[in-house]
Image (cartoon, rainbow, N blue to C red):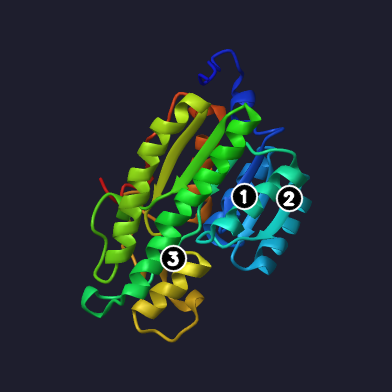
Amino acid sequence: MSIADVSGKSLAELVSLRGRRAVVTGGGRGLGKAIASRLAEAGADVLIGDIDEALAVTAAKQIAEHHAVRAVGAAMDVTDAASVASAADRALAELGGLDVWVNNAGVFPAVPVLEMTEETWDNVFAVNARGVFLGAREAARRMSAGGTGGVIVNIISTAGFRGSAPGLAAYVGSKHAARGLTRELALELAPLGIRVLGVAPSYVPTEGNMLAAAAALGDDAPPTDVPPTDLMLNGPVGRVGVPDDIARVVLFCASDLSAFMTGSTLLADGGDTA
């Protein structure tokens, strides 16, 4: 099954996701919620999966009301194959199909190598690498069964291109793994009409990583009290990124604007790796 030539479509048609169904993992807040919102704005019905079901349900309700699409919140543990499969099946049952899957869920504990336990290492890889594999596998099974193909977008990190900072060995290793998996998945799934792309943000302040950053700094203050400029110097574009900066790149990947692309990981880093 080849990827269609979309040269005859208008720009509005190329960016539109009207009639498509998307799943976003880790979508209850932060990057995931911003991504789900942009996909919904483009017309997609969305299932938001999150380890915190209440967050997922609340985010889905807000997105449905704001963008007039169908949105479902579901409990999803991306390290558990049955949980991922259940959420994928729920997308089929409640949204009517599956066209876009975004592997966004991730963890990023900061622990020096000499102090890191095997349990911490394994947990980071379970979420950031195994979770990408499980999500991609379950998405591809359903997309191929539907016969229409689809798009899988993996949220990587600039840490998938280089070392990052002391204490992030597990995170950096897992993101290199996810980037490599993106390339291999693209090769294997292309005959099924499924494109696979990665998006690699630099540090973007969100509720989740602000808390992690505060902990890494030994700061007991609430995460919203930690100034982004204390955590990362402004890059060449002159500011720290925001979640929607990444969401717009994911929308490009999910839409027909990127129809001739697969296997690439797009840096959305404000020039941080330039």
Q: Which three-letter amino acid code belongs to the residue tagged 2? A: Ala
Residue 26 left/right relative to 43: left
Residue 148 left/right relative to 18: left
Q: Who's the residue at 57% across and 33% down the image? A: 150
User: Measured from the top left, where is residue 108 in percent x and y?
Assistant: 39, 67
Q: Are marks 2 and 1 in contact (CB under 8 Å)?
A: yes
The vertical placement of 183 against 64, above or below, is above
Which is more foreground, mark 3 or mark 1? 3
Q: Who's the residue at 65% across and 38% down the image? A: 42
The vertical placement of 116 against 108, above or below, is below
CA neighbours of label 2 inside 10 A, class few (<14), some (14 to 19), many (20+): many
Report the residue marked by disc 1.
Answer: 36
| Residue furthest bottom in the image | 220
Q: Which three-letter amino acid code belongs to the residue tagged 1? A: Ala
User: Measured from the top left, where is residue 23 in percent x and y?
Assistant: 62, 47
User: Measured from the top left, where is residue 89 in percent x and y?
Assistant: 68, 48
